[in-house]
Amino acid sequence: MSDSMQTLEKHTSSEYKYGFTSDIDTDSFPKGLNEDVIRGISAKKEEPEWLTEWRLSAYRNWLEMTEPKWPNVEYPPIDYQDIIYYAAPRKKPKYESLDEVDPELLRTFDRLGIPLDEQKVLAGVAVDAVIDSVSVKTTFKKELSELGIIFCSFSEAVKDHPELVREYLGTVVPPADNYFAALNSAVFSDGSFVYIPKGVRCPMELSTYFRINAANTGQFERTLIIAEDESYVSYLEGCTAPMRDENQLHAAVVELVAKEKSTIKYSTVQNWYPGDKDGKGGIYNFVTKRGLCAGNHSKISWAQVETGSSITWKYPSCILKGDYSVGEFYSVAVTNNRQQADTGTKMVHLGKNTRSVIISKGISAGYSQNSYRGQVKVARKAENAHNFSQCDSLLMGDKCGAHTFPYLEVENPSARVEHEATTSKIGEDQLFYLQQRGLREDDAINMIVNGYCKEVFNELPMEFAVEAQKLLEISLEGSVG
Amino acid sequence: MLEIKDLYVSVEDQEILRGINLQVNPGEVHAIMGPNGSGKSTLASVLAGREEYEVTSGSVTFKGDDLLDMDVDERAHAGVFLAFQYPVEIPGVSTATFLKSSINAIRKARGQEELKPVDMLKLLRQKAAELEIDPKFLQRSLNEGFSGGEKKRNEMLQMSLLEPTLGILDETDSGLDIDALKVVSDAVNKLRSPDRSFVVVTHYQRLLDYIVPDFVHVLSKGQIVRSGDKSLALELEARGYDWVREGAVQ
């Protein structure tokens, strides 16, 4: 027993391996938020008048709102006037090739293991790397544009495809949806935009790496993905952030629109700085992600592996409006040390014969708190809706917590809703068995954890699954109790 | 090979083993018999290094090294293999993945190169066939939903793959039908060699018809109360455990 506890100690004390800051000049606004700052952001980005107004209206809504108190997380009050709302790398980077990119930036990417290099290109992944708030590099754009696919930074989309942005922005997550969505709508800096035309199957995984760099800079991404009828796209989002002492606020909004018979797969590996082992520092990750299955037979699938952030507040959701539409949520959420996660999903069944699947795997270690919060809602007219939910919690040690908050709201009697939940500890028996077969304790833990997460990893694109396994290894090095 | 001297073991302050002495030489097969609660399984677990068992005094040397000083995985690397009475289920981990990791971990610890995937596959298939195990079985999650017989065969598969120098069988025969018992015994007999030893823990004499021991020891209340050759097992079968219990008192 004492050996295990020691390993746990060793484990919990493993340091964040991506903690550093790079020296890139940033062009920042002063701290604080008011209408002038919002106008300033909008002007800096040369946005049309309607968007400036849209932001301002969101801001005015936000002023009237209060932070949600229902998540099972604790943190000191955030001073929203003590945050810088806009930072961009000073040397306006728009490059044709990597040679032109600031070498310091490239080194940063290297150290993060972000493969923004020829190998990645050869591997067939288009990378749109966002450092702080401005898109630095977009590859494969040309190849994609030949198919009519638009994959660009949000700012570019506003300039080049204003009609699309205007038509869809805020239609899935309205500006006043919740406190953090309203804040994002007011001050969002950049993000990604994807448009897949009718009948087109996107030939590669679209991938974006986000990164928070400048000190004291809140980051507010905005992502919008539209899949027209009979189209398909798989989108990958991966995140790492450098070590900081100050807490950093991240409030992103992701909106997905899936038309008839289209499929959007959205995969995330989130590895932001979780704070040190005493809970100092780390990212506040307050994210609103929602997909609308607008058309019949459409499908939206969320897969996420969350290992980072000091606080996570995130519920990728699906509105199943089209008949026969399908929503899926596959999640692995790992918390260690003093991390807190309140994450889950919402499946709202509106159309007939809609189906949803929720597979959530929580892993808690150290002193962390890990909550699953999920809602399944079946509207009155949603005939034959079917939901299957499975929420498992794995505890490592006896000082952490796992919680499950399922909410059910069924207004149509034809609905079939199944819920399974388990809580287990990594068994001494399992560890002993694997070690007796020659595996080191760490390897044994990894094997057990990977097995536990397998159903979710299976949903991730291959290379992402490999990355996710590595992340889990790093996050949980040796932790058991 | 294995030398146990005056071994005392407790679990949560309850003394289970009370002065065990046992010497196992290379090539020998020792059977440990005894009634339930006599400490047979404890002895097997202590040799493999299970944490909750506390050695209060005594020593165990294995090939000249202090076995009690080694971690569980180090013992495995040194050649100690425990066939579990209740093999553990590991959901989501395929049997093949587990076997590969295990084989390579042990090879690595012994300074051998890891097996190439092709050779590994060949080896797994060959050994599975010897144990009449369907290759599809290798794709299933480790021990999950396996029948009792399948679990025990899987233990034998692991033992033949890892080629230990000391194989400890902890009531491997419990819950097996006669066919499975033969498969298990065949696996052990095939592995018998002048430089490999076995400690076979069993409640019943039946297994010893198939795995013929060189020595039989009877354990009662944490002590070896009687030792002999294979005829002791037969006598025990005929007279019952009460006979040795009385012996312990004498």
Image: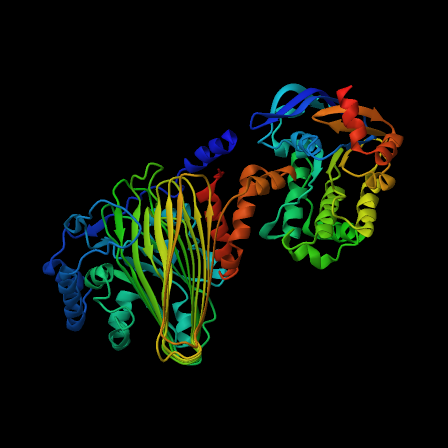
Residue A126: name its quadrant: bottom left
Nearer to me, B233 or A262: B233
Residue in view at x 41 percent, y 35 percent: A13
Residue in view at x 23 percent, y 61 percent: A184
Residue A260 visible from this viewpoint: no
**In the figure, B18 relative to A103: above or below?**
above
Residue A232 visible from this viewpoint: yes
Residue B37: name its quadrant: top right
Nearer to me, B26 or A397: A397
Image side of residue A11 versus residue B223, left or right: left
Image side of residue B120 versus residue A320, left or right: right
**In the figure, B13 relative to A217: above or below?**
above
**In the figure, A371 relative to A185: above or below?**
above
- Residue A96 x/y as whole percent: 36, 61
- Residue B87 x/y as whole percent: 66, 45
What sort of colour scheme is used for the picture? rainbow
Which residue sits furthest right? B231
Residue B136: name its quadrant: bottom right
Nearer to me, A236 or A93: A236
Residue in view at x 78 percent, y 30 percent: B242
Image side of residue A147 versus residue B190, left or right: left
Nearer to me, A111 or A404: A404
- Residue A60 x/y as whole percent: 13, 64
- Residue A481 x/y as whole percent: 48, 37
> Total marks drawn?
0
